[in-house]
Amino acid sequence: MITEIVTTRKKIVGILLVFLSWGWLFAIPFIPLTSNKAVNFHFPVEGVVQYLLVFFGYPGCSTVCPVTLKTLAHVYTDYGKIYQDEALKVVFVNLELGMTAEVSMRYAKHFHPDFLGYHLSKRQLNQLMDELGVSFFKYDGQEPLHTSYIYLLERQLAGWKMKYVYSQPNLVESNLMNDLRVLKSRRY
């Protein structure tokens, strides 16, 4: 009888540990990751831009791209209402090499007229994807898959530094605004 109770308790504890470990596994993507890594890529932005929100995707994506770019449009609009400066830009980087720069820019501007759409050479795209940990997979007859990270970069004297990486675009709007507030308060 006592051994049955001990065995049952061990099973219950084991099941609880499995559920707790799964809980952590699913909670991790909702936590923004902080960084101070230099980004060795020249983003051709004009003006007094201090912050970039960078997202990788492709025109025609029917899943994560529209949701993420709409979220970024809300963040960009809210930022503009609060700060009324031009320190923030949103950059959409097209993962599809077969498209033109015009298509990339038009797609980005569909979500907000101030967004920038980049179409890079294969070498530039691979360099930036490697540096930021972006993945892009194409399977025959299926919609391509890609990572849905949003990168918050801050201008430094010698280029850009990655400050935060957000992995759940539909849940990051308030986190992005809070992080931008903190970064701006440190600058002034």
Image (spheres, helix red, strand yellow):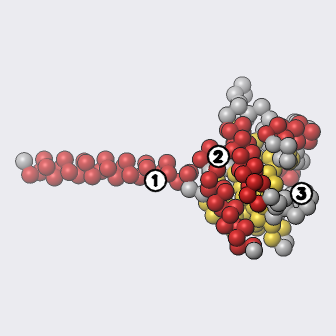
Question: Which badge, 2 or 3, is on the more N-terminal residue?
Answer: 3
Q: Residue at x 71, y 31 (%)?
A: 62
Question: Which badge, 1 or 3, is on the more N-terminal residue?
Answer: 1
Tell us which disc is closer to us: 1 or 3: 3
Residue 174, above or below 50: above
In-front residue for pair 117/178: 178
Question: Which badge, 1 or 2, is on the more N-terminal residue?
Answer: 1
Tell us which disc is closer to us: 1 or 2: 2
Q: Amino acid at mark 3?
A: Val
Number of the label disc, if any, that sits on residue 169: 2
Name the quadrant containing residue 95.
top right
Residue 42, above or below 120: below
Q: Position of residue 188 (x, y in %)?
A: 75, 74
The residue at which mark 3 appears reads as 45
Number of the label disc, if any, that sits on residue 116: none
Q: Residue at x 79, y 51 (%)?
A: 90
Left or right: where 89 falls relative to 9: right
